Image (spheres, rainbow, N blue to C red):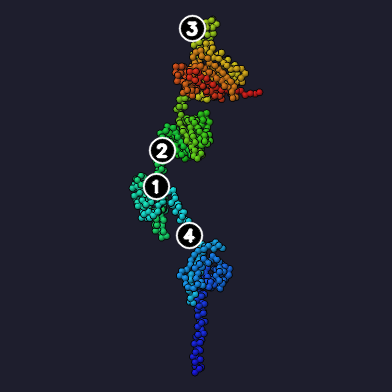
């Protein structure tokens, strides 16, 4: 019986002996799987018992602290990890009602971590803690960047110098900034009660709506629109808006983003500019002078109809290089010297110079030679020459008339000079014979004097006409030689005037002055013209004085009278060609004497001017160059 019992219980003992081994294996396998799960967690994991001993550490923690601390107290862990231990119930018993979660920055690697302390209730009633630590630096950085981006956007949106709007596809306002409220004159609350179509002028709304539909369809990435809007109170404000559409990940429209600018002043300026351009075009087209605007590289930017007529430019010539355009015109000086691309007025004006009334001969495309008067000035942009404006005046007809006049003057002077010389010579001979016979007093002598004075006056006018022709043709030739002014004036006065007139002309020129370098024949013309002028416009018996002095390296000669003087309005023009003072209409003359004198003085390299006080007299002054000192 006992054996049977043993045999009957033996299997049961085997069963009991195998049971614990199977349970341990299953438990071990379960723990291994849990360990694998914990190891697979992206962060660091450890388990702390109720008596604050470490029950488990993941590989990442072991590597982090440099060794396995399983079985040790949790005090050995880094102090910043105890963030989650503030509510730890270990050793106090009981089960906490919540887990502890927080963030900390590790001073070792300066990275951010989250730490979670989660209670675990064990079968024996004890409580352990599962602590999960995860690196969240990248997420933290992204969140911070997002926060800064949102703050920047909010600041940009609110503080922008232009109006900004977020609007739903249905037309409802989402967000507006202060500048838009300022442009339209409404507060935010007032603006949110209005619709877009009530703010846009009806004549502009349909065009704006059509562009918005294109944006919704995706036909264009953004739209631009100039339109009129109503301000609070009904005033019109012109706006320029740029509108884009923000879509979600699925491509559905989220909201419109608009940037709106007040362009009312710009539109007014554009309108004024447009009107000014229309006026300028009308003036430009109506001008009789040819006007050409050149760019900085000598290209023609604009040319009025008169310039096409004057220059004879065909349309296909405008786009050609400057040198080719110039070569077709063959521009040259009145003396026949050809202009190069660098001496032509355009090049000089683009170099920053101003050209006034320069005469240029050209050959037009139709073969006609034309005389032009060219004036020009540079165009500046940011203190740099950006172009040039040149005015071409056709003076061909004027030049022809001047040439005819000068030829006529020369012919008249030549044809009259011979008989005039005979009249003057015979009158002088007659005067000498009468003086020999003692008949130099009385009416016959006065008649002789009158004939001589008239003949000399006529001779001066003939010389003026001849000199005018020579100056016009640039045939004036000077024969320079040393001239002693004191001796020259004494000799001239003896030959120039009859005795009755000669008494009131005096010379106060001292001897010893350096000679001047001049043409004696032309110097005699200076004195003839100026003394004739002084005698003509000063009362009989009033003195006329000639003075000379060396001053500033040149000879300064003055002729002073005590006549009626010259009016201020005439003083600046008395040296102009054919100009006669307003009170001289009763006196004979062509108005050429002072003009010829000025041209002759300037040909010597000198200057001439007049000073006058009405009622007290006039002083004419001119300068001549001194001879070089060879000592």
The quarter of the rendered structure image containing the C terminus is top right
Residue 121 vs 217, above or below: the answer is below
* CA–CA distance in space, label 1 to label 2: 29 Å
* Pair 2/4: label in front: 4
* Pair 3/2: label in front: 2
Residue farthest toward the right in the current orientation of the protein: 631
Residue at label 2?
276
Residue 621 visible from this viewpoint: yes
Q: For residue 183, which numbered disc appears in the image? A: 1
How many marks do you count on the picture?
Answer: 4
Label 3: element kind: helix
**Residue 264 drawn at (x, y percent):** 40, 44
Q: For residue 443, which numbered disc appears in the image? A: 3
Q: Residues within 10 Å of mark 2 (few under 14, many from 20)?
A: few
* Pair 4/3: label in front: 4
For image coordinates 53% across by 73% down, the residue present is 51
For image coordinates 53% across by 66% down, the residue present is 81
**Residue 26 drawn at (x, y percent):** 50, 78
Asked whether the beta carbons under mark 2 and mark 4 sit within 8 Å of each other, the answer is no
Residue 517 visible from this viewpoint: no
Residue at label 4?
143
Q: Residues within 10 Å of mark 4 (few under 14, many from 20)?
A: few
């Amino acid at each position: 019986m006992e054996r049977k019992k043993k045999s009957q219980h033996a299997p049961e003992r085997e069963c009991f002996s195998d049971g614990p081994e199977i349970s341990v294996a299953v438990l071990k396998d379960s723990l291994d799987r849990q360990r694998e799960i914990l190891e697979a967690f992206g962060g660091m994991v450890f388990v702390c018992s109720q008596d604050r001993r470490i029950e488990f550490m993941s590989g990442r923690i072991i590597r982090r602290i440099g060794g396995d601390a399983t079985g040790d107290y949790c005090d050995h862990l880094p102090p910043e990890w105890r963030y989650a231990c503030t509510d730890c119930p270990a050793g106090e018993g009981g089960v906490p009602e919540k887990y502890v979660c927080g963030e900390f920055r590790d001073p070792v690697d300066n990275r951010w971590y989250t730490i979670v302390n989660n209670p675990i209730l064990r079968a024996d009633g004890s409580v352990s803690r599962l602590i999960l630590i995860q690196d969240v630096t990248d997420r933290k950085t992204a969140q911070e960047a997002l926060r800064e981006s949102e703050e920047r956007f909010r600041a940009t949106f609110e503080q922008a110098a232009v109006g900004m709007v977020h609007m739903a596809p249905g037309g409802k306002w989402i967000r507006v900034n202060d500048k838009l409220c300022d442009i339209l004159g409404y507060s935010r609350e007032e603006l949110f009660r209005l619709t877009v179509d009530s703010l846009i002028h009806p004549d502009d709304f349909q065009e704006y709506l059509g562009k918005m539909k294109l944006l919704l369809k995706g036909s264009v990435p953004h739209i631009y629109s100039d339109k009129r809007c109503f301000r609070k109170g009904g005033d019109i404000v012109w706006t320029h808006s740029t509108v884009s559409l923000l879509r979600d990940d699925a491509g559905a429209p989220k909201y419109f983003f608009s940037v709106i600018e007040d362009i009312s002043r710009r539109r007014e300026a554009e309108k004024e500019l447009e009107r000014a351009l229309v006026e300028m075009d009308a003036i430009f087209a109506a001008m009789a002078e040819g006007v050409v605007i050149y760019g900085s590289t000598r290209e023609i930017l604009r040319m009025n109809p008169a310039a096409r007529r004057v220059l004879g430019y065909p349309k296909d010539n405008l786009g050609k290089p400057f040198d080719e355009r110039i070569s077709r015109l063959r521009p040259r000086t009145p003396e026949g010297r050809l202009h190069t691309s660098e001496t032509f007025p355009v090049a000089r004006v683009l170099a920053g110079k101003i050209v006034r009334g320069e005469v240029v001969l050209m050959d037009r495309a139709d073969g006609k030679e034309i005389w032009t008067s060219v004036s020009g000035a540079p165009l500046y942009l940011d203190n740099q020459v950006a172009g040039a404006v040149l005015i071409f005046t056709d003076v061909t007809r004027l030049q022809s008339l001047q040439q005819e006049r000068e030829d006529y003057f020369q012919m008249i002077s030549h044809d009259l000079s011979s008989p005039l010389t005979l009249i003057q010579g015979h009158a002088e001979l007659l005067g000498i014979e009468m003086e020999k016979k003692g008949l130099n007093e009385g009416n016959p002598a006065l008649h002789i004097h009158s004939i001589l004075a008239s003949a000399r006056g006529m001779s001066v006018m003939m010389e003026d006409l001849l000199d005018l022709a020579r100056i016009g043709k640039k045939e004036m030739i000077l024969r320079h030689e040393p001239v002693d002014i004191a001796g020259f004036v004494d000799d001239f006065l003896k030959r120039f005037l009859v005795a009755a007139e000669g008494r009131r002309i005096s010379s106060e020129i001292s001897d010893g002055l350096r000679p001047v370098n001049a043409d004696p024949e032309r110097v005699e013309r200076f004195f003839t013209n100026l003394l004739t002028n002084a005698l003509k416009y000063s009362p009989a018996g009033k003195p006329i004085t000639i003075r000379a002095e060396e001053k500033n390296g040149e000879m300064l000669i003055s002729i002073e009278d005590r006549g009626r003087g010259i009016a201020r309005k005439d003083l600046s023009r008395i040296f102009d060609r054919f100009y006669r003072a307003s009170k001289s209409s009763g006196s004979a003359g062509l108005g050429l004497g002072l003009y010829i004198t000025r041209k002759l003085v300037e040909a010597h390299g000198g200057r001439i001017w007049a000073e006058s006080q009405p009622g007290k007299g006039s002083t004419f002054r001119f300068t001549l160059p001194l001879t070089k000192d060879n000592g």
